[in-house]
Amino acid sequence: MPRSPLEIEVSRRWLASLLWSVLHLGLLLLGAFVSPTSPDGKPLLLSPRRASLSEYRRLAAGWTQELTAANGELVALLENVPADLLTSNEQLERITARLQALASEI
């Protein structure tokens, strides 16, 4: 049977190598999107131990910010003591509750 001029013949080997190439490219792109990156955008190779250390450092930085903010509030409370004892007590209790929650988180 004669072929029409619009038919294209593709070998199975060529088709198989095309499919393997598309599969590899897809896996490469998937890996690029799900891989962890540093703040400057470089990929990180994390072992489970290093990943847990990195997570702990991130949490510790948040704790440090919380403690610094609480310290600032305590200093401000001591420098500008309100005449109303009830107001200063409420502020102190609020700061203490935040610090207790932070201590239980740590």
Image (cartoon, grey):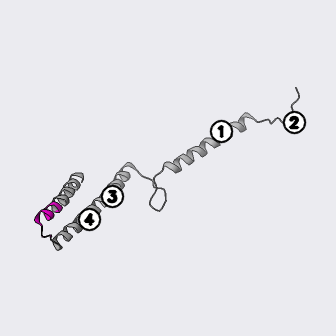
Q: CA distance from mark 2 to mark 4?
A: 77 Å
| Chief SS of the magenta region | helix
Mark 3: give few (<14), some (14-19) or many (20+) Cα within 10 Å: few
Q: Which mark is residue 69?
A: 4
Q: x, y percentage for residue 15?
A: 70, 37
The relative height of residue 4 versus residue 72 in the rendered view (above or below) is above
Percent of width and height locating residue 97:
18, 56
Residue at 47 percent across and 62 percent down: it is 40
Give the residue at x 63% y 40%: 20
- Can you say which quadrant of the picture contains the N terminus? top right
Identify the mark nearer the N-term, 3 or 1.
1
Q: Disc 3 and disc 2: Cα gap in Å? A: 66 Å
How far is the residue under mark 1 from the one under mark 2? 26 Å
Q: Secondary structure at mark 4?
A: helix
Could you tell me which residue is drawn at 53 percent across and 51 percent down?
32
Name the kind of residue labelled 2 in the image.
Pro
Marks 1 and 4, how far apart at CA: 57 Å
Judged by depth in the image, the label closer to the viewer, 4 or 3, is 4
Residue count near mark 4 (Cα–Cα under 10 Å), binned few <14, some 14–19, many ≥20:
few
- Pointers 3 and 1 in contact (C-beta within 8 Å): no
Q: Amino acid at mark 4?
A: Ala
Q: Which residue carries the number 1 mark?
A: 19
Q: Residue at label 2?
A: 5
What's the amino acid at mark 3? Arg
